[in-house]
Image: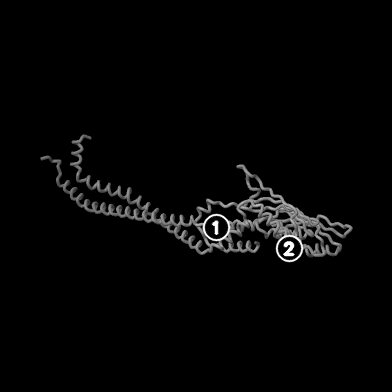
Amino acid sequence: MKEDINLVEQKKTDTTIKSVFNPLIALFGIVFLVSIGLIVYAFILSSTSETLADTANNIKAELGKSAKKQKYQIVTERLNSIKNVLETRSKVSQITSKIISNVPDEFSVDLINGSDREVLLSVSSTELSSFATYLESTLPKFAKNNSKVISKIEISDFAETKEGYTLSLVFKVINL
Amino acid sequence: MKNSELKLFVVKYKRYLIPLGIIVGTFLLVFMVILPQFATIVEKMKQIEDQRAEIALLNSSKNTLNSISEEELDSNLDTVAKALPLEKNVELIFSALSDAAAASDTNVQDFSVKVGGVYGLAIKPVGQAIGAPTIEVSAHISGADVRSVAGFASALEKALPLSETIKFDASSGVGSYIINFFFKAVDASQVANDFNIQPMSQAQKNTLKQLQDWQ
Protein backbone atom coordinates (compact mmCIF):
# COMPACT_ATOMS: atom_id res chain seq x y z
CA MET A 1 0.00 0.00 0.00
CA LYS A 2 1.34 3.35 -0.99
CA GLU A 3 1.56 5.75 1.89
CA ASP A 4 1.31 8.97 -0.19
CA ILE A 5 -2.25 8.22 -1.28
CA ASN A 6 -4.67 10.30 0.80
CA LEU A 7 -8.25 9.30 -0.04
CA VAL A 8 -9.75 11.43 2.75
CA GLU A 9 -8.35 14.66 1.22
CA GLN A 10 -9.57 13.74 -2.28
CA LYS A 11 -13.07 13.00 -0.97
CA LYS A 12 -13.13 16.42 0.69
CA THR A 13 -12.18 18.11 -2.60
CA ASP A 14 -14.87 16.17 -4.49
CA THR A 15 -17.50 17.25 -1.97
CA THR A 16 -16.44 20.93 -2.36
CA ILE A 17 -16.61 20.71 -6.15
CA LYS A 18 -20.04 19.08 -6.02
CA SER A 19 -21.33 21.79 -3.68
CA VAL A 20 -20.10 24.56 -6.07
CA PHE A 21 -21.21 22.80 -9.27
CA ASN A 22 -24.98 23.33 -8.93
CA PRO A 23 -24.81 27.08 -8.18
CA LEU A 24 -22.39 27.45 -11.07
CA ILE A 25 -24.81 25.72 -13.41
CA ALA A 26 -27.63 27.93 -12.08
CA LEU A 27 -25.51 31.07 -12.61
CA PHE A 28 -24.61 30.01 -16.11
CA GLY A 29 -28.28 29.31 -16.85
CA ILE A 30 -29.32 32.76 -15.63
CA VAL A 31 -26.56 34.48 -17.62
CA PHE A 32 -27.52 32.45 -20.69
CA LEU A 33 -31.21 33.38 -20.35
CA VAL A 34 -30.36 37.04 -19.80
CA SER A 35 -28.19 36.95 -22.93
CA ILE A 36 -31.00 35.45 -24.99
CA GLY A 37 -33.45 38.00 -23.54
CA LEU A 38 -31.18 40.92 -24.41
CA ILE A 39 -30.61 39.64 -27.95
CA VAL A 40 -34.36 39.27 -28.49
CA TYR A 41 -35.02 42.74 -27.01
CA ALA A 42 -32.32 44.29 -29.24
CA PHE A 43 -33.90 42.57 -32.24
CA ILE A 44 -37.33 43.97 -31.31
CA LEU A 45 -35.84 47.46 -30.96
CA SER A 46 -34.11 47.14 -34.36
CA SER A 47 -37.37 46.08 -35.93
CA THR A 48 -39.22 49.02 -34.31
CA SER A 49 -36.51 51.40 -35.48
CA GLU A 50 -36.80 50.14 -39.05
CA THR A 51 -40.58 50.58 -38.98
CA LEU A 52 -40.21 54.13 -37.68
CA ALA A 53 -37.57 54.90 -40.33
CA ASP A 54 -39.96 53.65 -43.02
CA THR A 55 -42.76 55.81 -41.62
CA ALA A 56 -40.49 58.89 -41.54
CA ASN A 57 -39.29 58.24 -45.09
CA ASN A 58 -42.86 57.88 -46.33
CA ILE A 59 -43.88 61.20 -44.78
CA LYS A 60 -40.73 62.84 -46.19
CA ALA A 61 -41.49 61.47 -49.64
CA GLU A 62 -45.04 62.77 -49.37
CA LEU A 63 -43.82 66.21 -48.23
CA GLY A 64 -41.04 66.24 -50.83
CA LYS A 65 -43.58 65.89 -53.65
CA SER A 66 -45.69 68.75 -52.28
CA ALA A 67 -45.38 71.99 -54.26
CA LYS A 68 -47.04 73.69 -51.30
CA LYS A 69 -44.07 72.80 -49.09
CA GLN A 70 -41.60 74.37 -51.50
CA LYS A 71 -43.67 77.54 -51.86
CA TYR A 72 -44.13 77.88 -48.12
CA GLN A 73 -40.43 77.34 -47.43
CA ILE A 74 -39.48 79.92 -50.04
CA VAL A 75 -41.92 82.40 -48.47
CA THR A 76 -40.54 81.91 -44.94
CA GLU A 77 -36.92 81.92 -46.11
CA ARG A 78 -37.56 85.13 -48.09
CA LEU A 79 -39.28 86.74 -45.10
CA ASN A 80 -36.27 86.02 -42.87
CA SER A 81 -33.90 87.49 -45.47
CA ILE A 82 -36.19 90.49 -46.01
CA LYS A 83 -36.37 91.15 -42.26
CA ASN A 84 -32.58 91.09 -42.18
CA VAL A 85 -32.38 93.46 -45.15
CA LEU A 86 -34.90 95.86 -43.61
CA GLU A 87 -33.03 95.94 -40.30
CA THR A 88 -29.55 96.37 -41.74
CA ARG A 89 -29.90 98.29 -44.99
CA SER A 90 -28.44 101.76 -45.26
CA LYS A 91 -30.43 104.44 -43.43
CA VAL A 92 -29.22 107.29 -45.68
CA SER A 93 -32.68 108.06 -47.02
CA GLN A 94 -34.29 107.93 -43.56
CA ILE A 95 -31.82 110.31 -41.96
CA THR A 96 -31.83 112.77 -44.86
CA SER A 97 -35.60 112.72 -44.82
CA LYS A 98 -35.52 113.60 -41.11
CA ILE A 99 -32.99 116.37 -41.69
CA ILE A 100 -35.04 117.92 -44.51
CA SER A 101 -38.32 117.67 -42.65
CA ASN A 102 -36.66 119.50 -39.75
CA VAL A 103 -35.73 122.48 -41.92
CA PRO A 104 -38.28 125.24 -41.28
CA ASP A 105 -40.53 126.26 -44.19
CA GLU A 106 -39.07 129.77 -44.41
CA PHE A 107 -35.81 128.22 -45.62
CA SER A 108 -35.10 127.17 -49.15
CA VAL A 109 -33.16 123.89 -49.40
CA ASP A 110 -30.46 124.52 -52.00
CA LEU A 111 -28.46 121.33 -51.75
CA ILE A 112 -28.38 118.04 -49.92
CA ASN A 113 -25.77 115.30 -50.30
CA GLY A 114 -26.22 112.07 -48.39
CA SER A 115 -23.78 109.23 -47.82
CA ASP A 116 -23.17 106.62 -45.14
CA ARG A 117 -20.85 108.93 -43.18
CA GLU A 118 -22.31 112.39 -43.43
CA VAL A 119 -25.08 114.49 -44.86
CA LEU A 120 -24.36 117.93 -46.29
CA LEU A 121 -27.20 120.40 -46.22
CA SER A 122 -27.27 123.87 -47.67
CA VAL A 123 -30.20 126.15 -46.91
CA SER A 124 -30.90 129.81 -47.62
CA SER A 125 -33.23 132.50 -46.38
CA THR A 126 -33.66 136.23 -46.64
CA GLU A 127 -34.31 136.58 -42.92
CA LEU A 128 -31.25 136.52 -40.67
CA SER A 129 -33.39 135.97 -37.59
CA SER A 130 -34.58 132.63 -39.04
CA PHE A 131 -31.02 131.32 -38.82
CA ALA A 132 -30.74 132.28 -35.17
CA THR A 133 -33.87 130.29 -34.30
CA TYR A 134 -32.78 127.36 -36.45
CA LEU A 135 -29.26 127.18 -35.04
CA GLU A 136 -30.07 127.91 -31.42
CA SER A 137 -33.31 126.05 -30.96
CA THR A 138 -34.47 123.80 -33.80
CA LEU A 139 -31.15 122.14 -34.60
CA PRO A 140 -30.02 121.35 -31.00
CA LYS A 141 -33.45 119.84 -30.31
CA PHE A 142 -33.18 117.78 -33.49
CA ALA A 143 -29.66 116.59 -32.57
CA LYS A 144 -30.84 115.61 -29.10
CA ASN A 145 -33.79 113.62 -30.46
CA ASN A 146 -31.56 111.84 -33.00
CA SER A 147 -28.46 111.30 -30.89
CA LYS A 148 -28.36 107.62 -31.87
CA VAL A 149 -27.73 108.44 -35.53
CA ILE A 150 -26.16 111.89 -35.50
CA SER A 151 -22.88 112.32 -33.67
CA LYS A 152 -22.03 115.88 -34.64
CA ILE A 153 -23.41 118.86 -36.54
CA GLU A 154 -20.92 121.34 -37.95
CA ILE A 155 -21.42 124.65 -39.72
CA SER A 156 -19.18 124.46 -42.77
CA ASP A 157 -20.17 127.82 -44.21
CA PHE A 158 -22.38 130.81 -43.56
CA ALA A 159 -22.42 133.54 -46.18
CA GLU A 160 -24.34 136.58 -47.25
CA THR A 161 -25.40 136.58 -50.89
CA LYS A 162 -27.41 138.87 -53.17
CA GLU A 163 -30.58 136.89 -52.41
CA GLY A 164 -30.04 136.72 -48.65
CA TYR A 165 -28.06 134.35 -46.47
CA THR A 166 -26.78 130.81 -47.04
CA LEU A 167 -25.95 128.25 -44.37
CA SER A 168 -24.12 124.99 -45.05
CA LEU A 169 -24.22 122.24 -42.42
CA VAL A 170 -22.49 118.89 -42.11
CA PHE A 171 -24.30 116.17 -40.15
CA LYS A 172 -21.88 113.46 -39.03
CA VAL A 173 -23.75 110.24 -38.92
CA ILE A 174 -23.35 107.08 -36.80
CA ASN A 175 -24.00 103.62 -38.33
CA LEU A 176 -25.83 104.76 -41.41
CA MET B 1 1.94 17.35 -25.16
CA LYS B 2 1.25 13.92 -26.52
CA ASN B 3 -2.23 12.53 -26.95
CA SER B 4 -1.84 10.00 -24.14
CA GLU B 5 -0.55 12.71 -21.81
CA LEU B 6 -3.53 14.90 -22.66
CA LYS B 7 -5.93 12.08 -21.91
CA LEU B 8 -4.19 11.44 -18.63
CA PHE B 9 -4.41 15.18 -17.79
CA VAL B 10 -8.13 15.27 -18.63
CA VAL B 11 -8.85 12.19 -16.55
CA LYS B 12 -6.80 13.45 -13.62
CA TYR B 13 -8.38 16.97 -13.57
CA LYS B 14 -11.83 16.12 -14.95
CA ARG B 15 -13.60 17.14 -11.81
CA TYR B 16 -12.04 20.64 -12.03
CA LEU B 17 -12.38 21.17 -15.78
CA ILE B 18 -16.20 21.18 -15.97
CA PRO B 19 -16.77 23.88 -13.30
CA LEU B 20 -13.87 25.85 -14.79
CA GLY B 21 -15.49 25.56 -18.23
CA ILE B 22 -18.79 26.81 -16.81
CA ILE B 23 -17.07 29.80 -15.18
CA VAL B 24 -15.24 30.65 -18.43
CA GLY B 25 -18.49 30.25 -20.40
CA THR B 26 -20.32 32.56 -18.00
CA PHE B 27 -17.62 35.21 -18.31
CA LEU B 28 -17.66 34.93 -22.07
CA LEU B 29 -21.43 35.42 -22.13
CA VAL B 30 -21.19 38.44 -19.86
CA PHE B 31 -18.40 40.16 -21.75
CA MET B 32 -19.18 39.09 -25.30
CA VAL B 33 -22.98 39.12 -25.29
CA ILE B 34 -24.57 40.90 -22.34
CA LEU B 35 -22.40 44.03 -22.18
CA PRO B 36 -22.33 44.65 -25.97
CA GLN B 37 -26.10 44.08 -26.13
CA PHE B 38 -26.63 46.63 -23.37
CA ALA B 39 -24.70 49.17 -25.41
CA THR B 40 -26.70 48.26 -28.53
CA ILE B 41 -30.01 48.50 -26.67
CA VAL B 42 -29.18 51.94 -25.22
CA GLU B 43 -28.16 53.14 -28.68
CA LYS B 44 -31.31 51.73 -30.31
CA MET B 45 -33.55 53.28 -27.65
CA LYS B 46 -31.97 56.68 -28.29
CA GLN B 47 -32.40 56.14 -32.03
CA ILE B 48 -36.07 55.24 -31.58
CA GLU B 49 -36.61 58.29 -29.39
CA ASP B 50 -35.06 60.51 -32.10
CA GLN B 51 -37.12 58.83 -34.82
CA ARG B 52 -40.35 59.35 -32.86
CA ALA B 53 -39.43 63.01 -32.40
CA GLU B 54 -38.70 63.30 -36.13
CA ILE B 55 -42.04 61.72 -37.04
CA ALA B 56 -43.83 64.09 -34.66
CA LEU B 57 -42.04 67.00 -36.37
CA LEU B 58 -42.93 65.70 -39.84
CA ASN B 59 -46.59 65.30 -38.86
CA SER B 60 -46.53 68.80 -37.41
CA SER B 61 -45.06 70.05 -40.72
CA LYS B 62 -47.86 68.29 -42.61
CA ASN B 63 -50.48 69.89 -40.38
CA THR B 64 -48.89 73.32 -40.84
CA LEU B 65 -49.01 72.96 -44.62
CA ASN B 66 -52.61 71.67 -44.54
CA SER B 67 -53.68 74.71 -42.53
CA ILE B 68 -52.56 77.16 -45.26
CA SER B 69 -54.76 77.92 -48.23
CA GLU B 70 -53.24 77.64 -51.69
CA GLU B 71 -54.48 81.13 -52.70
CA GLU B 72 -52.99 82.80 -49.65
CA LEU B 73 -49.68 81.01 -50.21
CA ASP B 74 -49.52 82.08 -53.88
CA SER B 75 -50.29 85.66 -52.91
CA ASN B 76 -47.58 85.65 -50.21
CA LEU B 77 -45.10 84.11 -52.63
CA ASP B 78 -45.79 86.87 -55.17
CA THR B 79 -45.25 89.54 -52.52
CA VAL B 80 -41.95 88.17 -51.20
CA ALA B 81 -40.65 87.38 -54.69
CA LYS B 82 -41.35 90.97 -55.67
CA ALA B 83 -39.69 92.32 -52.52
CA LEU B 84 -36.59 90.14 -52.85
CA PRO B 85 -36.40 88.79 -56.41
CA LEU B 86 -34.75 85.46 -57.08
CA GLU B 87 -32.43 87.05 -59.63
CA LYS B 88 -31.36 90.39 -61.07
CA ASN B 89 -34.52 91.78 -62.60
CA VAL B 90 -34.14 95.09 -64.43
CA GLU B 91 -37.86 95.26 -65.18
CA LEU B 92 -38.72 95.20 -61.49
CA ILE B 93 -36.01 97.78 -60.77
CA PHE B 94 -37.47 100.13 -63.37
CA SER B 95 -40.91 99.55 -61.90
CA ALA B 96 -39.65 100.44 -58.38
CA LEU B 97 -37.94 103.61 -59.65
CA SER B 98 -41.10 104.67 -61.51
CA ASP B 99 -43.32 103.98 -58.49
CA ALA B 100 -41.02 105.97 -56.20
CA ALA B 101 -40.92 108.84 -58.70
CA ALA B 102 -44.71 108.87 -58.92
CA ALA B 103 -45.05 108.80 -55.13
CA SER B 104 -42.58 111.70 -54.65
CA ASP B 105 -43.81 113.75 -57.60
CA THR B 106 -40.47 113.51 -59.41
CA ASN B 107 -39.27 112.07 -62.69
CA VAL B 108 -36.67 109.45 -63.50
CA GLN B 109 -34.53 111.10 -66.15
CA ASP B 110 -32.31 108.07 -66.72
CA PHE B 111 -30.85 105.14 -64.94
CA SER B 112 -28.10 102.64 -65.54
CA VAL B 113 -27.59 99.22 -64.05
CA LYS B 114 -24.22 97.75 -63.17
CA VAL B 115 -25.24 94.20 -63.98
CA GLY B 116 -21.83 92.62 -63.36
CA GLY B 117 -20.37 89.55 -64.99
CA VAL B 118 -22.31 87.42 -67.41
CA TYR B 119 -20.14 84.34 -67.26
CA GLY B 120 -17.08 83.20 -65.33
CA LEU B 121 -16.08 81.33 -62.18
CA ALA B 122 -14.90 84.47 -60.41
CA ILE B 123 -18.09 86.42 -61.03
CA LYS B 124 -19.67 87.53 -57.80
CA PRO B 125 -22.64 89.78 -57.07
CA VAL B 126 -21.81 93.48 -56.81
CA GLY B 127 -22.38 93.65 -53.08
CA GLN B 128 -23.40 91.27 -50.34
CA ALA B 129 -23.04 93.32 -47.22
CA ILE B 130 -26.15 92.19 -45.38
CA GLY B 131 -26.80 88.63 -46.41
CA ALA B 132 -28.35 89.33 -49.80
CA PRO B 133 -26.50 90.21 -53.00
CA THR B 134 -27.19 93.58 -54.56
CA ILE B 135 -27.22 95.12 -57.98
CA GLU B 136 -26.03 98.71 -58.22
CA VAL B 137 -28.14 101.27 -60.03
CA SER B 138 -27.30 104.90 -60.83
CA ALA B 139 -30.29 107.14 -61.44
CA HIS B 140 -30.89 110.79 -62.21
CA ILE B 141 -34.05 112.26 -60.76
CA SER B 142 -35.64 115.61 -61.43
CA GLY B 143 -38.29 117.39 -59.44
CA ALA B 144 -39.73 120.76 -58.55
CA ASP B 145 -37.13 121.41 -55.87
CA VAL B 146 -34.51 119.74 -53.69
CA ARG B 147 -37.09 118.66 -51.13
CA SER B 148 -39.05 116.65 -53.69
CA VAL B 149 -35.88 115.15 -55.18
CA ALA B 150 -34.76 114.12 -51.69
CA GLY B 151 -38.26 112.74 -51.10
CA PHE B 152 -37.60 110.25 -53.89
CA ALA B 153 -35.25 108.35 -51.52
CA SER B 154 -37.97 108.03 -48.88
CA ALA B 155 -40.47 106.83 -51.47
CA LEU B 156 -37.97 104.33 -52.87
CA GLU B 157 -37.47 102.89 -49.39
CA LYS B 158 -41.10 101.76 -49.43
CA ALA B 159 -41.03 100.46 -52.99
CA LEU B 160 -40.51 96.86 -54.03
CA PRO B 161 -38.02 95.31 -54.78
CA LEU B 162 -36.20 96.34 -51.63
CA SER B 163 -33.32 98.73 -52.08
CA GLU B 164 -30.95 100.96 -50.15
CA THR B 165 -29.79 104.40 -51.13
CA ILE B 166 -26.03 104.46 -50.82
CA LYS B 167 -25.36 108.03 -51.90
CA PHE B 168 -27.22 110.91 -53.39
CA ASP B 169 -26.60 114.50 -54.37
CA ALA B 170 -29.52 116.84 -54.93
CA SER B 171 -29.47 120.48 -55.96
CA SER B 172 -31.58 122.77 -58.12
CA GLY B 173 -34.33 120.22 -58.58
CA VAL B 174 -32.00 117.53 -59.94
CA GLY B 175 -30.53 114.61 -58.06
CA SER B 176 -28.15 111.80 -58.77
CA TYR B 177 -28.62 108.59 -56.83
CA ILE B 178 -26.59 105.45 -56.28
CA ILE B 179 -28.92 102.68 -55.15
CA ASN B 180 -28.43 99.02 -54.35
CA PHE B 181 -31.32 96.71 -55.20
CA PHE B 182 -31.43 93.41 -53.33
CA PHE B 183 -32.02 89.99 -54.81
CA LYS B 184 -31.37 86.47 -53.57
CA ALA B 185 -31.42 83.08 -55.24
CA VAL B 186 -33.16 80.15 -53.60
CA ASP B 187 -30.98 77.40 -52.20
CA ALA B 188 -32.91 74.50 -53.78
CA SER B 189 -31.04 71.75 -51.91
CA GLN B 190 -31.70 73.42 -48.58
CA VAL B 191 -35.41 73.72 -49.38
CA ALA B 192 -35.58 70.10 -50.52
CA ASN B 193 -33.84 68.71 -47.44
CA ASP B 194 -35.56 70.81 -44.83
CA PHE B 195 -38.69 69.15 -43.45
CA ASN B 196 -39.06 71.31 -40.37
CA ILE B 197 -42.00 73.47 -41.39
CA GLN B 198 -43.18 75.75 -38.62
CA PRO B 199 -46.10 78.15 -38.67
CA MET B 200 -45.08 81.74 -39.45
CA SER B 201 -43.62 83.60 -36.49
CA GLN B 202 -45.06 86.95 -35.44
CA ALA B 203 -41.93 88.67 -36.83
CA GLN B 204 -42.47 87.00 -40.22
CA LYS B 205 -46.15 87.98 -40.20
CA ASN B 206 -45.21 91.59 -39.38
CA THR B 207 -42.66 91.68 -42.20
CA LEU B 208 -45.21 90.26 -44.64
CA LYS B 209 -47.82 92.82 -43.53
CA GLN B 210 -45.29 95.62 -44.06
CA LEU B 211 -44.51 94.39 -47.58
CA GLN B 212 -48.21 94.08 -48.42
CA ASP B 213 -48.69 97.69 -47.27
CA TRP B 214 -45.87 98.81 -49.54
CA GLN B 215 -47.11 96.82 -52.53
Q: Quadrant of residue A162?
A: bottom right
The residue lying toward the viewer, choosing from A82 and B30, is A82
In the rendered structure, which disc, 2 or 1, sits on the residue that comes first in sequence? 1
Residue A159 is tagged as none
Q: Quadrant of residue B159?
A: bottom right
Q: Measuring from the top left, give residue B190's x and y in whole percent.
A: 53, 52
Residue depicted at x 26% and y 51%: A28
Could you give the CA–CA distance between mark 2 and mark 1, rounded to whole angstroms? 46 Å
Q: Measuring from the top left, give residue B161's x and y in whole percent.
A: 65, 56
- For residue B210, side relative to residue A151 (left or right): left
Disc 2 is attached to a residue of which chain? A
Look at the numbered disc 1 and give the secondary structure of its residue.
helix
Total numbered labels placed on residues in the image: 2
Q: In the image, what residue type sits under mark 2? A: Lys
> In the rendered image, which quarter contains the C terminus of chain B?
bottom right
Q: Measuring from the top left, give residue B6's x and y in whole percent.
A: 20, 38
Q: Measuring from the top left, give residue A36's x and y in whole percent.
A: 29, 53
Residue at mark 1: A71
Look at the numbered disc 2 and give the secondary structure of its residue.
helix
Residue at mark 2: A144
Q: Are marks 2 and 1 on the same chain?
A: yes
